[in-house]
Image: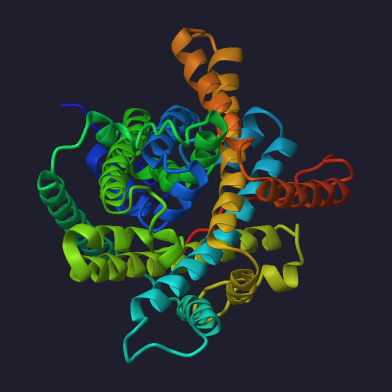
Amino acid sequence: METTNTSPSSTVSAPRLRRTLTLWDLVLYGIIVIQPTAPMPAYGVFSNAGQGHVVTSILIAMVAMVFTAMSYGRMARVYPSAGSAYTYVGRELHTSLGYVTGWSMTMDYMVNPLICTIWCSKAMADLLTGTRFQVPYPGLVWPVFFAGMFTVLNLRGVKTSARINAVLCAVMGAVILAFFWYTIRYIFRIPQFPESFFLRPFFNPQTFTVNRVFHGTSVAVLTYIGFDGISTLSEEVDNPKRNIFLATVLVCLITGVLASAEVYGAQLLSFHRFGTDFGVFSQFGDENVFSHVAGIAGGVLMTKLISVTLLIATVGSGMGSQLGAARLLYGMGRSGAIPKKFFGAIHPKTHVPANNVLFVGVTALIGAFLISYDNGAELLNFGALIAFMGVNLAALTHYYIRGNDRTLGQLIPPVLGFLICFFIWIHLSTLAKIVGSIWMIAGIAFGAWKTRGFQSDLVNFDVPPEE
């Protein structure tokens, strides 16, 4: 019988994360991060931007995201512990391009809690309108309330558990099923309509132009934001080379199909009641339109149910995105890219970057009074699309330009992913491109000055681990 060497040097190793997550664990995680109600809060914004072609915009965005998801999955094989666009770009293309990608992502992190503050404020004011709980000056009170709540809870280190997230996801699933049930029942009771009525959410000849649809797509990308978070779990996944790739693609596909079905039902309801997809906007604004459209089929109860569900989900998203932004700023401050004394500080009791939480909270509050929800959404997508283009180029460089396996499968997906994302990006609004460009120019100029022309690395963009 053979003996095994059991000396300390051969048996003792550094602690490692356990590879316990399966493919479907990853898919569930991705759906929870994106949220199964993803297109509902911004439905009005999507419809205004695409002149009613919401389904088409979401499906075009899905194609771009699926190709980009393939690139994320492939790059996760190469850098299993990184899981970030700026790391992929910095290591495959150039460190300065990695910095530019990271800087664009910083804008995403900063804008996300801002638009959550705007949406929650508008939704709460809408929810309480006409009730005894209606407050005076809602445009002032609710932004202060939600920005303050996000900040206070994050300062105290309050986090939602995985169980709460799973329960919330189940509740959202039940609400979605109720919406489908009432919508299908309503549609089947409608007198016979021509086929064009059911095709109208895909193509409306009165409002269709390529520029309008792709402008709508540039906003509809917001539906998929967060899918790339799957790649950060590479070290905890069983068979990561296979499962990260499949899960990232599947989450984009499932999200796209579910989101398309949700807005398709909403558009049919709106078309039937108002004869247009814009009939409710003048009454209710852009932010909480979906709830009122759902009320066409399900009544006031459905309107309130969806409003409350989306409000709770967006509060969770706002808290999480604010802490994510604070942690990213901490990584920048820790490395000396921005003032370390302020941004690189950690609260000794809560282990939270408290200064950064306050900074992001104040930014969200001020921004809520300066910009609209749709402008904020486009600003967020400005940076996200830059990161997505960078990941596609990184995958192309690693697997096709430098790799030995130069097949069409390594060439076509990243090229198409890059081109579609670029085409969507150039159809962002002029305001989003101007503000986003100012942000990028400022970051590039600062980085060049700090590193004397990018002669050295400026920032470690890896978000620090939890204490």
Q: Could one spot residue 119 in this view of the protein? A: yes
Find residue 245 and report its image quarter.
top left
x and y percentages locating residue 192 in the rendered image = 14, 38
In the figure, 432 relative to 86: above or below? below
**Residue 83 appears in the figure:** no
Q: Left or right: 164 with respect to 139?
A: left
Q: Position of residue 168 (x, y in %)?
A: 25, 63
Q: Is residue 375 left or right of residue 192?
A: right
* Image spot of residue 107 (x, y percent): 63, 54
Task: Report how many numbered discs are placed on residues in the image.
Answer: 0
Residue 431 lies, in percent from the top left, at 69, 51
**Front position in the image: 328 or 300:** 300
Foreground pick, 57 / 461? 57
Relative to 130, 458 lies left or right? right
**Looking at the rendering, which quadrant does residue 372 occupy?**
bottom right
Q: Residue at x 48, y 42 (%)?
A: 81
Q: Quadrant of the N terminus?
A: top left
Closer to us: 309 or 8: 309
Q: Quadrant of residue 211?
A: top right
Coloring scheme of the render?
Answer: rainbow
Give the answer, above or below, for where 5 lies relative to 179: above
What residue do we see at 29% from left, 32% from top?
199
Residue at figure coordinates x 89%, y 45% from the top left: 452
